[in-house]
Amino acid sequence: MSTLPHNRNARGSRHATIQIRNLRLRTFIGFNPEEMSKQQDVVINIEIRYAVPESALRDEVDGALDYKILTKRVIRHVEDGRFLLLERLVGDVLGLCSEHPSILSSRVTIDKPHALRFADSVSLTLEYRADETNNLRLLEKAS
């Protein structure tokens, strides 16, 4: 017997949110000569909202969203990459965080500490919503 409350959305599924906070990595980010030759710190925050499969509520691993595997993919991509723009880096990470079929939405914020002289950091946030992507695909097909 499950001890979780039976809160469900209109379709009858449970939703959960995974947050990966302050993942600190180093990468090549920027287009100035110094930025292209020296790795810089970035701080990544990820929020993923997904439909929790019934199997996960029964403590079965199959079909569950594995945040450890996802985080390792993000680390490898960021540390092995070279990026001119923060938009590209955030977009790439968002893409990795939106691939699993149970993901309803995801949000990625990446901070670039010390990018500006008198600021703690510069950050950029991008979001993905599965329902908006599906609508966009339908519009693309119609045109």
Image (spheres, helix red, strand yellow):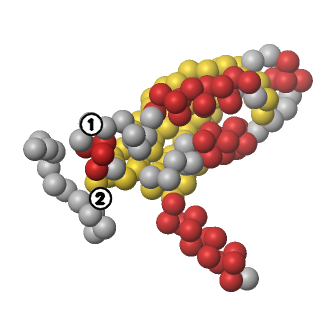
Q: Which residue is mark 2?
A: 13
Residues 30 and 25: in front is 25
Q: Which residue is mark 1?
A: 59
Q: Decide: marks 1, 2 in contact (CB < 8 A)?
A: no
Please tell me which residue is depicted at 55% across the width and 54% down the height of the picture.
Answer: 128
Whether residue 117 is visible: no
Horizontal side of residue 30 vs 126, given as left or right: right
Mark found first going from the N terminus, 1 or 2: 2
Under mark 1, the amino acid is Asp
Q: Is residue 34 above or below residue 45?
A: above
Residue at (67%, 42%) from the top-left corner?
92
Residue 124 at x, y percent in the picture:
61, 41
Q: Disc number at residue 124?
A: none
Q: How many C-alpha atoms fall within 10 Å of the one at disc 1: few (<14), some, or many (≥20)?
A: few
Residue at the spot x=52%, y=30% of the render?
69
Say above or below: 131 vs 123. Answer: below
What is the three-letter code of the residue carrying label 2?
Ser
Looking at the rendered structure, the secondary structure element under dot 2 is: loop
Q: Viewer-nearest of labels 1 and 2?
A: 1
Q: Residues within 10 Å of mark 2 (few under 14, many from 20)?
A: some
Of all residues, the one furthest to the bottom in this rendering is 142
